[in-house]
Image: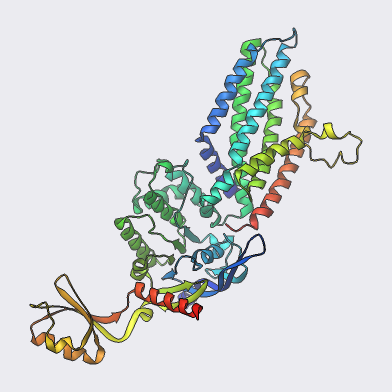
Amino acid sequence: MVDEQATQVAAIRIDGARKVYSAIGGQHREAVRDVTFTVKAGGVHGLLGPNGAGKTTTLKMLLGLVKPSGGTFELLGEPAGPVARARVGFLAEQPYFSPLLTAGQTLSLHGRLSGMSRADIRVRSNELLVRVGLEGKESLLLSKFSRGMLQRLGIATALVHRPELIVLDEPASGLDPVGQRDVRNLILELREGGATVLLSSHQLSEVEAVCDQVTILNRGKVAAAGRIDELLNVAGETSFRVAGSSDVLPESVAGRVSDVAFAGGSHMFSVADNDVRIVFDALDDAGWRILSMTPKRESLEDYFARLLESSTEEVAS
Amino acid sequence: MIGRVWSLAVSVFFDALRRKVVWVVILFAAVMAAAIPSLPSYGFGVVEAVYREIALALTYVATMVLTVALAANRIPAEVERRTAYGVLVRSVRRWEYLLGTWLGILVTVGAAVAAFTVVDIVVGWLTYGEIMLRLAEGTFAILLEAGVVAAFCVAVSSITGPVVVVVSSLAFLFIAHSRSQLLAPGDALWGLYPSLDTLNIINPVAHGTGVSLTYVASMIVVFAAWVAILLVFATGLFSSRDL
């Protein structure tokens, strides 16, 4: 019963967030207008949007870096403020640290600011430096760190106090493919450990790989929200990947498929759900191998582009 | 709360220790202090007093240069490079961040002033055979004034850039030491004028017998009042700022 109640508490609740920037001369720019969304505890939630969509401003309002013009913000069931923030870890896009401190001093500072003891910081720092691939770099000045190493250290500082909620703003920025894979695995590990992750990213493949739910912002508003499957699955169609002895699909199949592509010795195409059985049997009869058969899913890139196009048309009309 | 403020101060201190400006100013001041006895035209009997006066004046200039160099760009750079984000998204209040930054600068400047004091006393002892411990009173007053200037820099830099901070801190020092030139003790504005003259004890230290403990206590009160006002003002400005 207690566990059930605990899981019902939202890790993040943002209601009616609004931010208007005023400039000299009385000009106003509305960066965020009426953004409302909830992040359930214990999952990975993606926050997507093009540049200028209001993602970073929304995160900054949530974390107290920017004063909201309106709306309410809750973190882990408490009003977002210094007390609630003690249980939150944050990685800024391109995190910067004082170049005149060492990695160990930086982790120590962040641990102390979160109320950790020196002994605990020492143990946790060693553990995290290994985890983010910076083993043995504790005494190295940050002025000698590459951008990717700073990003890894940023992840370590975000996790140093074992936060229940981790907000990651472009965590893979500046990392090589191996680093990006490591970040992805780390996010999944955090989820398995029961933490909640809010991932703001431009890298749609990264979001697609790890997020359970996404909220898409555009022009300062929520443009779409939901489970990735719900947003991306194309109703009534199935994707096939097949391989055969010929470069051309059997005649009985060719007329029933769409979006055909040929690469790496295999054909990929879509089939209406009503024709799946017929196409399957025809391929089987012709001696083709069915490599995969899955519900057709739009790529997040395509979905995103379509969403932005439609909102641009709305504005134009 | 104290733990967070102290942690920030320690971080500022270690960061400052690796800044070249700190070592350049300390080295320059040490060389200059060592060179004071070689200056000509000392009158008979006042040579030690002149040494003390020049040593304190040199310490004052070096300390103020160091204070402004450390404080003017600290917060603007942290905000611009987003170093401050990582700190302020934790359970750190903005006033704690400002207080920790100020304290770190004060500790660094305090270490430099201690070094200046040792150099001044050692050079005086080697040259004149007199251990001038009274110089420590003067350098303590200089440290207190540096604390006020650091608080002023923190306040101004919480909403502006380093150039404005440097210019305004020089103007602040000029205004704060010009009361006696602009007003007479009986004038109505005398008590309201923002003055740091209380912290200027070069004359009694160099040429007299120093200051009493009561006077030292009054200096600490003036220092604390100035710092409190300036840091409260800084908090007001910084808290309303979007980062």
Quadrant hosting residue B153: top right
Q: Which quadrant of the figure has residue A232?
A: bottom left
Q: Position of residue B8 (x, y in %)?
A: 56, 46
Q: Is residue A239 visible?
A: yes
Tell me if residue A287 comes above or below residue A202 in the rendering. Answer: below
Is residue A278 left or right of B59 when viewed as pictured? left
> Who's the residue at 74% across and 42% down the image?
B226
Q: Does the image show residue B1? A: no
Q: Nearest the camera: A154 or B155?
A: B155
Residue B10 image point, x, y percent: 55, 42
Q: Position of residue B42 (x, y in %)?
A: 71, 10
Q: Residue at x 66, y 28 (%)?
A: B61
The foreground one among A40 and B165 is B165
Image height check: is A246 above or below A154?
below
Q: In the displayed structure, does residue A217 sit left or right of residue A15?
A: left
Q: Residue furthest front?
A: A316
